[in-house]
Image: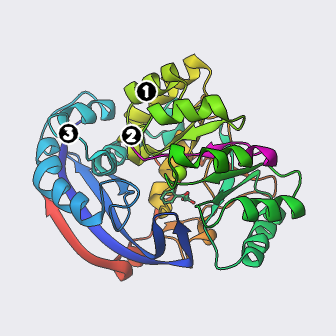
Amino acid sequence: MQINSIELVEINLPLVHFFETSFGRTYERRIILVRVEDTDGAEGWGEVTCGEEPGYSDEWTDSAWVTIEHVLAPMVVEKEVADAAGIWDLMKKARGHRMAKSGIETACWDLEAKKLGVPLWKHLGGVNQTIECGVSIGIQDSVEQLIEKITTEVEAGYQRIKIKIAPHWDYDVIKAVRKVFPDIKLMGDANSAYTLADIDKLKSLDEFDLMMLEQPLPYDDIIDHAKLQREIKTPICLDEPIKSHDDARKAIELGSGKIINLKNGRVGGHTQSKLVEKVCREAGIPVWCGGMLESGIGRAHNIAISTLAGYTMPGDVSASKRYWHQDIIEPAVEVSTAGTITAPEGPGIGFEIMQDRIEKATVRTKGIV
Ligand code: OSB
Ligand code: MG
């Protein structure tokens, strides 16, 4: 495989509904799309999944743009590698910036699968064409609003409900939700809003029979999480600190959690996700695919990787219409009434890229040749 050119396109897409986490509220996404083209003129598409600000991780839209333009793209363009799995190594000299790398890397996987005429999910080694879906619901202005949103998603068929939590939006809120929905698969995601000093509060959440508690402690921690896991019944799910298969191995060894939210962007793309999935599968640690409010392109990549054997729990991969008035792919991602998505049969990501919609949402482009 030889990539001849890389094109960056920043699009701005307003969310159907704001999304609030413990680190802030998002109304509109600034998304970088990556289009790669090889020497035969074949193309592939990827998405950089970082946020607009360095709130979830240290990467953000503007940092990813310059990093790809000045550092990563020049490492890849016109270099010969055996296959898409070899793209990661071309970028090895740059430390970190995994979401930026993932944008390029996943685009190369799409290109390769398209050239081979196979669906990306099969090319990645997927085994379950139909994946289980959950939703992630942000912090709302009122508990009534939250209950209303949960009702909508439960009625739509989603298999588990994740709600964002924070010190001002936790015990009482979950209690109110459990009163209305005593039996649903429910979990909380704190996005690092607590410390070990909050241990009594976190212990008190055990009474709600949560499926898991995602990332209660600091974003770079796996030590305190191990201490916390020994004190609480609810399984801890790690998100932010797991950036590689080595991080996963160490966290498993320490007992920092019992489940991993595996995000393509956070670990650096499909090749890295496959490595994390393998470490976890062999250790008996379930993984599920997390989301970063992706457009259809990132969503399509999430669907493909979710078909791997180790992804045994419902992910945060949900329907396009929950995020966008109109997605940039066709068909839009839809979820069945059983709360599942079936990965498409077409080559590559298996969705059509709607160029006119991308153009309408474009704020800047940059070609690197
Ligand atoms: O922590 O999983 C997270 C969104 C942005 C940043 C971090 C997270 C999330 C989500 C949303 O939970 C998942 C989605 O619906 O895409
Ligand atoms: Mg999370």
Ligand 2 closer than 8 Å to label 1 CB: no
Q: Is residue 109 visible?
A: no
Q: Earlier in the sequence, mark 1 or mark 2?
A: 2
Amino acid at the residue labelled 1 = Leu
Q: Quadrant of residue 320?
A: bottom right
- Label 1, label 3: how many angstroms apart (C-alpha)? 18 Å
How far across and how far down the image is residue 227, in percent?
54, 31
Find numbered disc 1 in the image and state the secondary structure of the residue it sits on.
Answer: helix
Please state the extent of the stretch shown in magenta in the rendering.
205-220
Amino acid at the residue labelled 3 = Arg
Q: Magenta stretch: residue 214 in it? A: yes
Amino acid at the residue labelled 2 = Val
How far across and how far down the image is residue 271, in percent?
38, 33
Find numbered disc 3 in the image and state the secondary structure of the residue it sits on.
Answer: loop
- Label 2, label 3: how many angstroms apart (C-alpha)? 12 Å
Image check: 15 left or right of 317?
left
Q: Quadrant of residue 356?
A: bottom left
Q: Which residue is mark 1?
A: 275
Residue placed most toward the observer, 101 or 260: 260
How far across and how far down the image is residue 258, in percent?
61, 30
Q: Which residue is mark 2?
A: 267
> Where residue 96 is drawn, which disc sits there?
none
Asked if marks 1 and 2 touch (Cβ < 8 Å), the reply is yes
Q: Magenta stretch: residue 37 in it? A: no
Counting other residues with Cα less than 10 Å from the Cα at mark 2, is it few (<14), some (14-19), or many (20 or more)?
many
Q: What secondary structure is the stretch in magenta mostly built from? A: loop
Q: Which residue is mark 3?
A: 95
The quarter of the image holding the N terminus is: top left
The quarter of the image holding the C terminus is: bottom left
Asked if marks 1 and 3 touch (Cβ < 8 Å), the reply is no
Find numbered disc 2 in the image and state the secondary structure of the residue it sits on.
Answer: helix
